Amino acid sequence: MPTDSCPFESPIATVNLCPDNAQRPYNADAVRDGAETIRRHAGEALTGLFPEGSGGEPSEAKAEVWSNWDEFSALAAQLETLSEGLGLAADNGLMSGSGGQAQGGMMGGGTGMMGSANTMMGGTAPMMGRGGSFDAAALAAMPADGVFNMIAQSCSACHTKFRLEKN
Ligand code: HEC
């Protein structure tokens, strides 16, 4: 993965993983594109970058990648589902309500929207649990930045467990 470019630059104004910390107005198309970029690098595209025996210097991959391959691939698959979900949630806009298009039918009504989104956010922890599976349809009903936050947690969950801290 190149480090000079920043493929994970967030198109969502309130969150940004890139050094320039730029703030941009919400753009559902950019969110969909970004989600698709992540999706193409997740799942088996991600695990395929880690053939058996490729650990050790200069890689930052821990030996656990291969000794605990099932969990590693589950996290890669989870990232794939989450990025699919982000693509589906792009039109929902942000939690604050800005940028979204009215999706009354799907969300069960405007006022109910935040309520159900919050409930789902409250459910994030159990959903992130080991072996927990995500449902792209449930993610599709969430605010886009809620799904994005779950993606960020998914990145760091895998890094904490499977990537060496080096500096
Ligand atoms: C399934 C596990 C897993 C997931 C999920 C994951 N990563 Fe990683 N990532 C790794 C591992 C392992 C390395 C170390 C690879 C190496 O050095 O060989 C790494 C390395 C990186 C690097 C450094 C690449 C380099 O050239 O040194 C970046 C940047 C990165 N990840 C970003 C992300 C972002 C952003 C996400 C979420 C969108 C993410 N990763 C999700 C496992 C994961």
Image (cartoon, grey):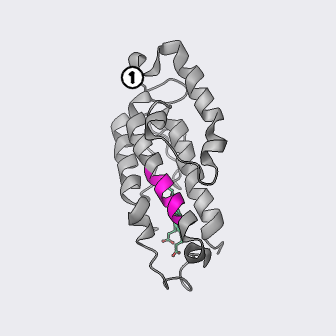
Q: Which residue does the image show at 44% across and 79% down from the upper left? A: 51
Range shown magenta: 72-80
Indicate the position of residue 33 as horizontal and vertical percent values.
34, 46
Q: Give left or right: position of 3 versus 87.
A: right
Residue topped by disc 1: 101
Frontmost residue, 165 versus 22: 165
Question: Element under label 1?
Answer: loop
Q: Main secondary structure of the magenta part?
A: helix
Indicate the position of residue 74 as horizontal and vertical percent values.
52, 59
Indicate the position of residue 120 as horizontal and vertical percent values.
59, 32
Q: Is residue 97 magenta?
A: no
Q: Is residue 81 visible?
A: yes
Q: Give left or right: position of 156 versus 31.
A: right
Indicate the position of residue 10 as horizontal and vertical percent values.
46, 47
Question: Which quadrant is the C terminus positioned in?
Answer: bottom right
Q: Which residue does the image show at 40% across and 64% down from the upper left? A: 44
Mark 1: C-beta under 8 Å from nearest atom of ligand 1: no
Is 76 placed above or below 91 here? below
Q: Which residue does the image show at 63% across and 54% down from the upper left? A: 130
Q: So how many labels did they put on this image?
A: 1
Is 46 placed above or below 106 here? below
Question: Which quadrant is the N terminus positioned in?
Answer: bottom left
Q: Which residue does the image show at 40% across and 45% down from the upper left? A: 84
Q: Residues within 10 Å of mark 1 (few under 14, many from 20)?
A: few
Is 43 placed above or below 28 here? below
At label 1, the amino acid type is Gln
Q: Is residue 5 visible?
A: no
